[in-house]
Amino acid sequence: MATPPIQNSLQVETSNLQILKIALPISLAMLVPQINFFTNNIFLGHFSEHALATASITGVYYLIFAMIGFGLNNGLQTLIARRAGENKPDEIGKIFGQGIFISIIIASTGIILTWFAAPYILKSSIRSEIIADDAITFLKIRIWGLPFLYVYQMRNALLVGTNNSKYLVSGTLAETVVNILFDYLLIFGHYGFPEMGLNGAAVASIIAEFTGMAVIFIVIHYKGITQKFSLFNHIKWDGINARRILTFSWPLIFQLAISIISWEYFYILIEHHGQEALAVSNVMRNIFGLVGCITWAFAATSATMVSNVIGQGRKDEVQFLIRKIVKLSTGSSLIITIMINIFSAQLLSIFGQGETFIVSGIPVVRVVTIAMVLMSFAVVWLNAVTGTGNTRVTFLIELIAIIIYCVYVYLALEKYFLSIMYGWMAEWLYWTGMFTMSFFYILSGKWKGKVI
């Protein structure tokens, strides 16, 4: 299908090259935090199985707030991409400024909840008192990285939404190097640093998030993007744009929040199966994240490009564009999951937990990799719905899928107390349901009259 000439660098075309130019830098940017998680857990696994098990609870808890920021990021990104498609650069700066304000307010709320509400929730739901106490101590440190993470995510929304995703890598690369360095120094206490164990990973992550934020600010400033969109001319409260962002983003925020909350529920049920089950599942989360960074990059590309193309008035090309992104996403996922299955024992051995751990983990790897393939196309279609502007439909799709997921994991892990392999099969239901609903909504064409 021929595409019209590009009128402005802010507008996109629907070629495979354009898709990859947006998706690959996003993928690398998402890969780096996953490498951070992966590295944290390798170090913690060699420190103690208890630390590795506790990290599964704390990691998913922090991920809840990270995904709230990611929901705001997605909403901001879609609005910015729509204004980019409409060639309205002045509006982009105004939207971005309000995104920063809103993210700081949400981060402050997250810190307060973690200090004063989370201890009661974790104490009442985790059976192991030691794990609960360690998780609470860790989170009271870790949560202070949230403001840095949120501001960083808003910058990512600006770069992706304006077709400048190539600059994402610099911040995330700096974040990774700093995180690995301070993990090594603070978890084990090398070179005169205190041996902090699990809490050392928390401090290292905060330092890394601040570094990533600072570096990306410097890069954007020297590349002229700050001046191009007059970003610092809009550092004041703008009620109209703030309401627009919140109205558009709140379904995405709640969508991602309930998604990760359900995952935290899953891990709490896994904890009832013992420390090894929890440690195995924590490794599965890391593997899921490593593959998912590629899938989520294509998903973010889907939302951005669909919104941009609609902003250009090319609605008839939307389904064609989605299918091209799906082919690239699913093809990439298949290659990686095949490699994971071939070398699953070697991969699990990295965490230093012994032969029993590897034997228990391999069947779960098989289940999880099938879920990864399902995710690779389901999440692209879901984010295409976001790109059309109807975020309430996105939220409704997520909510229905989550209800199915939670009912299944309760029956499998708690009521019938099946092995964790069967618990992880909930991912099959989740992604299949999400794909089905998103696919038929896009095909219905009901989104074509939506204006944002």
Image: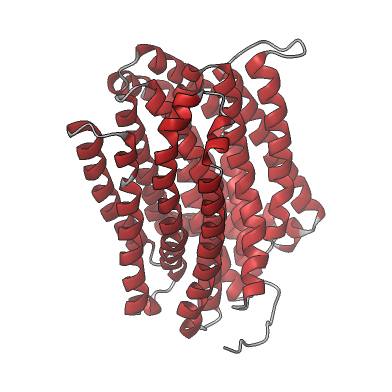
| 436 horizontally vs 310: left or right | left
Residue at far right of view: 222
Between 109 and 235, the residue placed more toward the observer is: 109
Residue at far left of view: 415
User: Is 271 placed above or below 379 here?
Assistant: above
| 212 horizontally vs 66: left or right | right
User: Is 70 placed above or below 438 here?
Assistant: above
Residue 237 appears in view: no
Q: Residue at x 38, y 79 (%)?
A: 449
User: Is 325 placed above or below 300 here?
Assistant: below
Quarter residue 203 falls in: top right
**Residue 371 at x, y = what percent?**
40, 52
User: Is 239 placed above or below 278 here?
Assistant: below
Residue 397 appears in view: yes
**Residue 17 at x, y = what percent?**
67, 73
Q: Residue at x 35, y 78 (%)?
A: 443
Q: Residue at x 52, y 53 (%)?
A: 338
Q: Residue at x 61, y 86 (%)?
A: 3
Q: How many marks?
A: 0
**Residue 446 at x, y = what percent?**
33, 77
| 81 horizontally vs 278: left or right | right
Between 168 and 268, the residue placed more toward the observer is: 268
Protein image colouring: secondary structure
Quarter residue 423 falls in: top left
Q: Quadrant of the N terminus?
A: bottom right
Q: Quadrant of the C terminus?
A: bottom left
Between 387 and 105, the residue placed more toward the observer is: 387
**Residue 328 at x, y = what percent?**
56, 67
